Amino acid sequence: MSSFNFTIDAESSETWARAGTIQTPHGTIETPIFMPVGTQATVKSVSPEELHGVGAQIILANTYHLMLRPGSALIDSFGGLHSFMNWQGPILTDSGGFQVWSLAHNRKLNEDGVVFKSHLDGSSHALTPERVMQIEAELGADIVLPLDICAPYPSNPTEARKAMEWTHRWEERALVEKEKLRPEQTLFGIVQGAFEADLRAQSAQVIGNMPFQGLSIGGLSVGEPKEQMWEMLKHVTPELPRDKPRHLLGVGSPEDLVIGVGLGMDMFDCVLPTRVARHGGLFTRDGRVSIKGARFRTAHGPIEEGCDCYTCQHYSAAYVCHLARAEEQLYYRLGSIHNIRFMLRLAKELRESIINGTYPTFRETFLARYVPASEKVREAQREKWIKARDQRA
């Protein structure tokens, strides 16, 4: 039997924002929370000990990637992911549904599941709802997600409905299989529906009424304008049960957290903080800056005054700038630590504002100062990522 539990500690009277506490076998999670992504059982360039030091409460790993390398059976032989990667806090494993979407050129879908070619060596693999539960049972995460279908953007209503309905049937099968394997694991359901408001509301109702212990909202942040993403959440949140945590899959820039919390989301994950850090992009209260910029070359102070991260407490912006320009390995660690700490500190501040009844003011103050990346920059980054992905495949 799962020892998972979720309680609501405070709610905003003017928005859907709420602060909660999640109990898992490997520790407590205070929400709202950002989850650093350790796709291959590691958050790139940051050790588990450093993650603990920046305040990470839960991390996310990926079923698809770990199935291919090193293999779930090997991880199981070490006692599961917690022992294998020496992370004793909670872990959530994604099902691989997003990777199935992003590798659409290498896969075939049918009612039973998906057959795809590995991006590593071209070998053929089949994933079914049951097989995903079996892999995740071997990985041993606290929270697991079922196989789903992420419709492309844009997609027509017929395509979106088909993906949603298949996802619903797959999730029913996943519920049955999970209980056979590891009833103590917590299974979240995934809401789909692409960018059709009626389908989003329908999926939220269907998945919300299934015996999942939490809900993940998938199929967003796949290339659409952010305003469209927020509009879809406005159709989803009212249909979700109040007493279950809500996870917005793959979304995690600073402004995403601040806005998403007001739309009722509790948990966020994204590779963005570490990915942009590796390319010189560091978060500040004024927006993302390029540490490679000329203004940092001789800066004696930290990246951002008042930042309590390890990097800002121990190194000058000039030194970090030098490391980034020289592409030294130490930069990737220091930059990633800064961005992850920024996100986790922001999540904590959001929680405190909800408890104090000041979330609307916090949101307006933050968004008035923070300058997000433009849609043009986001699209360029997305195209660059797609090109790199296709070249690897």
Image (cartoon, grey):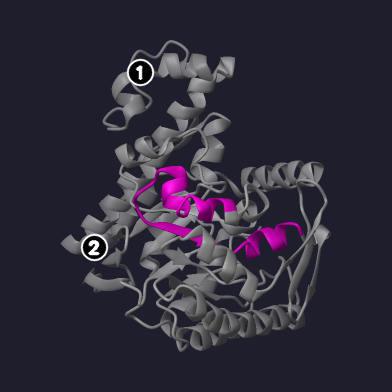
The kind of residue tagged 1 is: Tyr
* Most distant residue in the left direction: 356
- Residue 166: where, in percent of width, then height? 68, 82
Residue 365 visible to the viewer = yes
Q: Which residues are magenta?
A: 74-103
203 vs 314, left or right, is right
Residue 307 in the image: above or below residue 122: above
Query: Residue at (78%, 42%) from the top-left corner?
Result: 392
Could you say which is closer to the camera, residue 231 or residue 137? 137
Q: For the point 32% across and 71% down, which residue is it?
A: 4
- Residue linked to disc 1: 315
Residue under pointer 2: 354
* Outermost residue toward the front in this view: 77
* Amino acid at the residue labelled 2: Ile
Query: Does the segment drawn in magenta span residue 287?
Result: no
Q: Position of residue 190 (x, y in %)?
A: 54, 74
